[in-house]
Image (spheres, rainbow, N blue to C red):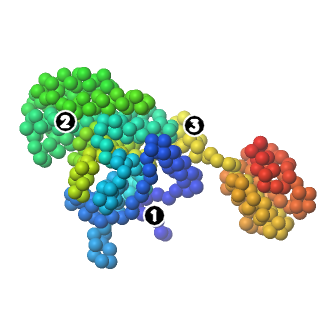
Amino acid sequence: MFERARGTRDFGPAEMGRRLAFERMCDEVAYRYGFQRVATPTFERLELFTAKSGASIIEQLYAFKDRSDRDLTLRPELTVPVMRMIAEQKGQIPKPARYSYFGPCFRYEESKRGRYREFWQYGCEIIGAPTSLTEAEVVAFACAIVEAVGLEGWQLNIGHVGILNDILDNLGLEGDAVGDAMRLLDKGDFTGLAASGIDSTAVTNLQSLAQLNGGIETLASARDIITSMGVESEALDQLEEMLNNLSALGANPPSLVVDLTVARGLDYYTGMVFEIMVDELGGEGQVCGGGSYKLFHLFGLDDLDPCCGFGLGFDRVLLALEIQAEKSGRSEVVPGENSGAATLAVIPFKVDVSQVLALVSGLRAGGQPVLLELRERNIGKSMAWANSTGAQFAMVVGPRDIESGQVTIKRLSDGAEANCEMSAEAIGQTISSM
């Protein structure tokens, strides 16, 4: 037996219906927010990702050599390839640029529910406008997607790496020590932070920052804690401005938590950072994450930094929606997944099929989805086939129908029937009215 590779999935018609509906929804929201869709190759030069994340990342990649002995890899994410695309244009793009993207990514990781070796990512970047308003636009876009798709009970965690940088700089940390402290803070490991040599009073203050629980109103308490540490942070003012802009843009998450120790675990973030979390997914509960970052310096285009964007876990959002739909008893997972014109199964019976094809063509040209029966069999088997396809209506065309110019449309869900003229226009109107 040939089996699909571990960490990959097959998608049947029903699942693809959901995925296509969700992708269309993401694009519709992106269009409203002024984002333009771009695409990059599925494989890239290996050094593109080692330059960003170091050689250790190779263990997580599907890396290989081509026939010319070049080091390549299947892309593990989409942000850096978009940066590379812009760099090849020498940064000569309209600024600010708003790009969205979607596609499969590949990581050689432990395969489990919510974590796959082939996964899909939807995301965006705003380039050339390093402001708090840009950050608000990006977060509002992410919130608009998860709201539009009907995800319930999600939580927006938001912070600012600059605040932590200001504090750690004041503590005298430099180089790798800053990154190590960031990762410990992101994990909430204050024991490890104390063991790293940071002053116990500072660790206590950082823990107090981490324990603040609430929205923009917590910034006053945060300011008191930071001031007590002898730190003045412009980043805190920037975060407050960003949150005010976010509210004015109409973003209204079910839960918003200002978390000043959210560091996203990645060294290239420099400003606002955020995560969208869903309880139903447990340890894999993050469905979206992003913020402001610097990457263009890798390409010698420092003037384009910082940028702001996010990556949305397409598969995880769908998984969370499936769990929530199952709990609530909904049959539809993604709003609109079964939308569009109802499908009509056309069954030629004991007639020359050429007498039916022009009608089928006319129906399709008018926007009516049509499934044409391709096999000659009895009515019972043809109707069973029509039911199995998911078609909503069926129409048998026999000799008497051809002779009379009249046909019967049958609704498959309950057997209701309606007669009409055998023309594409009349059939379409009948289906719409049933």
Of mark 3 and mark 2, the one earlier in the sequence is 2
The spot of residue 286 in percent (x, y) is 36, 42
Of mark 2 and mark 1, the one earlier in the sequence is 1
Residue that numbered label 1 is attached to: 4
Query: Which residue is rendered at x = 13% and y = 37% of the image?
Result: 168
Q: Give the camera-side residue of 405 and 425.
A: 425
Image quarter where the C terminus lies is top right
Distance of label 2 from label 1 (alpha carbons): 45 Å
Q: Residues within 10 Å of mark 1 (few under 14, many from 20)?
A: few
| Viewer can see residue 89 | yes
In the rendered structure, the answer to whether residue 23 lies left or right of residue 176 reads right
Distance of label 1 from label 3 (alpha carbons): 31 Å
Q: Mark 3 is on which residue type?
A: Gly
Q: Residues within 10 Å of mark 2 (few under 14, many from 20)?
A: many
Query: Which residue is rendered at x = 19% and y = 36% of the image?
Result: 164
Q: Give the camera-side residue of 293 and 98.
A: 98
> Could you tell me which secondary element the residue under label 1 belongs to?
loop
